[in-house]
Image (cartoon, rainbow, N blue to C red):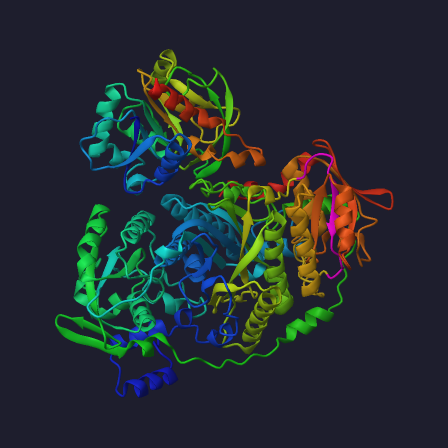
Amino acid sequence: MEILTSSELNYLKKKLNREPNLLEKEIVGAQWSEHCSYKSSKKYIKLLSKKWDRIIKGPGYDAGIIDIDNGDVITIHIESHNHPSAVEPYGGAATGVGGIIRDIISMGTMPIALLNALRFGHINSPFASNEIKTSIRTNNELHSASKWLLKNVVRGIADYGNCIGIPTVGGEIEFDESFTNYCLVDVAAIGFGKRKNLIKNIIQEDDILILAGSSTGRDGIHGASFASKELAVENRSAVQIPDPFMEKLLVEVTKEAIEANILKAVKDLGGGGLSCCLSETSANLNKGFDIDLGQVPLKYNDMDPEEIMISESQERMLYITNKDKLKSFAKILQKYEVPFAVIGTVKNHKNLVINKNGKTIANMPSHLIAYAPLLNRNGKKPKYIDDLRVKEISVTPPHDLNKTLLNMLANPTIASKNWIFQQFDHEIGLRTIVKPGITDCAVIKLNNNKFLAAKLDGNSKLCYHDPYQGTLTCLSEARANLISAGAHPIGIVDHLQFGNPENPEIFWSFKKSIEALIDFSNFNKIPVVGGKVSFYNETKIGPIKPSPVIGMLGLIKGMVGVSQIRPTAEDTLYIIGITSDNMGGSEYYEFLSGVKGGRVPPLDLQTDLNNSRIVLKIIKEQLISCSHDCSKGGLAIALAEMAISSNCGLNIDLDKLPNTCERLDFLLFAETPSRFIIGTKNEEKLENEFAKCKNLKYSKIGKVMDTGDNITFMAKDKKIINLEMKNAKRYYENISSIMKNQ
Amino acid sequence: MLKIGIPIFPGSNCDRDIYHVLTKFYKIKTDFIWHKKDKIKNYNAIVIPGGFSFGDRLRAGLIAAHSPIIKEVKRLGNDGVPVLGICNGFQILVESQLLPGSLIKNNSLNFICKWTDLKVRNTNTPFTSKFKMNELFKIPIANGEGRFILNKAQLKEVKKKNQIVFSYHNDDPNGSIDSIAGITNEERNIVGMMPHPERTCQSELKLFGLTNSAMKIFDSLIAYIKK
């Protein structure tokens, strides 16, 4: 495997004014991998606005930091572990969780919640379209991996987070053929702390570098480079091994050391191992390091310097303190029996100098290592996008809409995720007042009567049809999820996942996606506080669909401002927003009808904002008793979910619903964004509020019944859907029966 | 002054939650006691928290059961001091043979986190005096190895001696024998349970259809030690 491209090697030679040795090439190679250097994407990420009031640290750091008053701060970070999880789902997913937890503690905050967004190929569903079923049958071997991946990814995340004692409070999951024999595992961590305890990251000459945690081994060798190419050969040695117990000890050590004001700088070891950790820290803090590689605790005595520098062994942290405090820090490490070693000292020379046995074996300016030469990638609009948009699609309207709704409820992308949630300890820490499934997003308790709402959203089907509109829709959905719980959005994180960026068509999609992110952030004045880019998500079958995952955080002051999706008996239901019949990329087309193509629903930023504002206002004024956004699966699914969550039947009249649909099935299942369903016992006051809003499209659509009646939809005085609650529930709980015998 | 001790091991993770409940809700002086401490005194009660002590290495609770602090907990327990073990704390009490039985992997082989209904089967312990006999209440579980088992003779014995304190009602999430969720020693001062009463402390839970009634376990304990 070539460590550096020939132009990169030439650049390095020119800057060094000499030939780099093998170790130096490996160090630079790890740092200049796409995974660590963002060499394709950095130019575009820099276009995000940086000037925001509450943002202490924005994109480009281990985690973003948001000031939430009273001296409190929230930190958030998102990462993926796609390649490792596709090869070894348990270890890959678990070490992904480990990485983001260390990012949070590196800032000086303690992790209080985890979320995840997962994407897999189709799991065998008896309710899918014939096209999907045939594809599963003919490629049985590839598809059988999906269930195995799902089961072990969930278990990997669960075992890691549960053991450390950080609640996994929310998530999102999508199944699509483009992830066949592969998977996307995005994990996000939220930290909470005091502004005064944030790590200052100011160091001086003669300060001491301590490496603590697990020994360095041969696991994860070339992990960053592995993640920077298509997944062609399954490279198991590039996958790291998880040890949540050691991570828990590191969390406790860091907490005690922060409270004792011992730490001057902290950095976790992740992709690229010591190479990236040391060069980035040295470059960011503008100091040099003299490292004695002989001091690094090893799993095997015969490891080469190259292996030691690029090993991605997990559960390792770099701490910097001064000589006076070293003793008290050592005491804390010894209390928890965490192995550690002093591996170097801070120097004023600004180089990364690696010594072993008294000899200097690498010596390069840290800035040179940390800042890879950026690339100019070309983008070209893929031909398929226009083809799909104008494609003539004929889907026969179903004659039994009852059956259609049941099959949609059983769609694993839509169905209940209880089977997954129950494997995560989502309660530990006493902050999870609102359990998963009660609101559209996770809501956790902070202090001073403040609550934090958080959600991850993605939609690869829409983003494939139109990466710009698709990304906007993900952002809109994440915001709608926060709004419908009653939260005020305060920050966005993004994780942009694409195939090979050397392919101009894929790079074009990436550029469109980041354009959408910038437009949404600027228009709505919600800062992007952090993010990640992951390219080369490809297998022999081809690239994944463009899959930006959007995370959004919101604040709620006081519990009265939390709204649930669960209606109460006798509520009157309203819909806000127009339903249009653009069905491209919808679950109705893709899962039930097996067709791609058509236009994706357009999103108007102003309407989206207006609708969100009015919903937040009526929640704050306590005019409503429940609210739910309308997204995957459309109106019919949103209403069925509300009915199932409350165990109360619904009676819906579709005639007055604001829409431009020519067909009933489209009206029921279109995924038009910017729509909310709300329930109230305050019709008059609510309609007065609505009347004050110019151009607001809304209508009364029905009533919640007393108890476990049927879910009924009427159109032109005819019952077009009449579902028994217990039947609806059975289909909705379908994932647990699919996964039971795994 | 009344004082409660929380023994902690590397990997304990519900220690701060219990501490929060005892200090914030009951205003009781509470100490964390590091597992290496081999001499403790003046504790009115001990609560062993949940978590993954020593990373569940070998078997959940096994290594912790052989730590210096557990020797002291045994001494206090023999003197009649109330001892409560929750989740991993229960596993530790079983492994240290302060309580009968074993805890093994759940029936489903999965970790399970959810709210369950519990039934009180013995009100004659320091942790259940505020309940009525057969009272039902809601409480969350969160465990991977929560399936409580006994052999036939042991089951007969604990039934005869009325040692079953809590059992799952209707749905037995782990597959425990006789749906047992919590058990006590013959002297009734040591109780182990898999569900987490501390997680029911927040009053806001009521807004979402849950209750705080599992807090009666701590109400009972505080009343007992104040007597």
Point out the stretch of residues depicted in magenta: A567-582
**A388 left or right of A340 in image:** right
Left or right of A678 on screen, residue A249: left
Task: Return the residue nearer the eye: A437 or A404.
Answer: A437
x and y, in percent, of residue A600 in the image: 69, 64
Principal secondary structure, stretch drawn in magenta = loop
Q: Could you tell me which residue is drawn at 43 percent across and 76 percent down? A: A39
> Which residue occupies the foreground of this view, A449 or A342?
A449
Q: Residue at x 40, y 32 (%)?
A: B146
Above or below: residue A382 compared with residue A628: below
Quarter of the image with the N terminus of chain A is bottom left
Q: Residue at x 31, y 47 (%)?
A: A245
Give the number of marks.
0
**A401 with respect to B216 (left or right):** right
Give coordinates of residue A575: x percent, y percent: 74, 49
Q: Is residue B31 visible?
A: yes
Q: In the rendered view, tell whether residue A703 sits above or below residue A2.
A: above
Q: Is residue A79 left or right of residue A591?
A: left
Quick one: which residue is furthest to the right in this view?
A717
Residue A405 sits inside the magenta stretch: no
Q: Is residue A578 magenta?
A: yes
Q: Position of residue A513 (x, y in %)?
A: 58, 69
| Res B192 quadrant in image | top left
